[in-house]
Amino acid sequence: MVKKARSQEPHALLRQLATVPDKLFAGNFAQQYGALCFRDKREASGIEILLTTSRDSGRWIIPKGWPIKGKKPIEAAATEAWEEAGIRGEVKKRPVGRFTYLKALEGRELVPCLVDVFQLRVTEEKEDFKEKGQRILEWVSPEEAARRVSEPELKTLLRGFKQRKASKPRG
């Protein structure tokens, strides 16, 4: 069953950060890779960005995850887009930005994470994918995407997103 997306309190992230100051200042951030998936709007000019809900908290995010052994960061980001949303496309080789957030692990331990974000221009969307039924997917404007996500750096990245010429198809 799909969890409903929850609205986020504006200061929820700051409250979380305040609970783990020792981890924040130790400089030990876990690395993750994310895909900023976008497509041309179907009935107007401009683009739409794919948001998905996280499986645990139901908050709005972009597809992202841990490094994958034997895969480059660009490939890991493309794999996350495929598994979490059934999306494949052309991925830019260099990250378009990065953001930080606190990941709640099993046992409620909070781990600071640094996410390098790769642009992915969508060329294929599948109805059936690995995490179907575990997430809600929505295509929204960059402005709406920025309103929905909680992480301040990701908000800034989404608001200022300008597509770059992409590399080769991945996924």
Image (cartoon, rainbow, N blue to C red):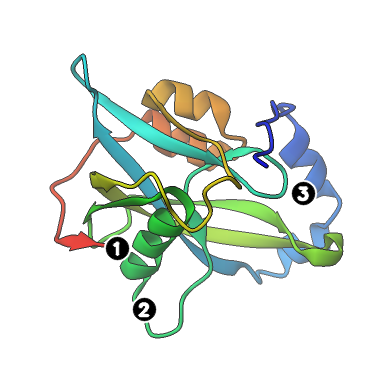
Q: Amino acid at mark 2?
A: Lys
Residue located at (80% from left, 46% from top): 16
Say whether residue 29 is left or right of residue 51: right
Which circle, 3 or 1, is nearer the viewer? Answer: 1
Q: CA distance from mark 2 to mark 1?
A: 11 Å
**Residue denoted by label 3:** 17
Q: Which is nearer the eye, 133 or 7? A: 133
Residues packed near mark 2 inside 10 Å, few (<14), some (14 to 19) or many (20 plus): few
Secondary structure beneath dot 3 equals helix
Asked if disc 3 and disc 2 are in contact, CB closer than 8 Å, the reply is no
Q: Residue at x 44, y 54 (%)?
A: 129
Q: Amino acid at mark 1?
A: Gly
Q: CA distance from mark 3 to mark 2?
A: 31 Å
Q: Report the quarter where the C terminus lies.
A: bottom left
Q: Tell me if residue 28 comes above or below residue 98 in the rendering.
A: below
Q: Which residue is mark 2?
A: 71
Q: Which comes before the other along the chain, label 3 or label 2?
A: 3
* Nearer to the camera, 145 or 127: 127
Mark 3, other Cα within 10 Å: few <14 / some 14–19 / many ≥20: some
Of the residues under marks 2 and 1, which one precedes in the sequence? 2
Q: Quadrant of residue 169?
A: bottom left
Q: CA distance from mark 3 to mark 1?
A: 33 Å
Q: Earlier in the sequence, mark 3 or mark 1?
A: 3
Give the residue pinned by disc 1.
Answer: 171
Q: Is residue 57 left or right of residue 114?
A: right
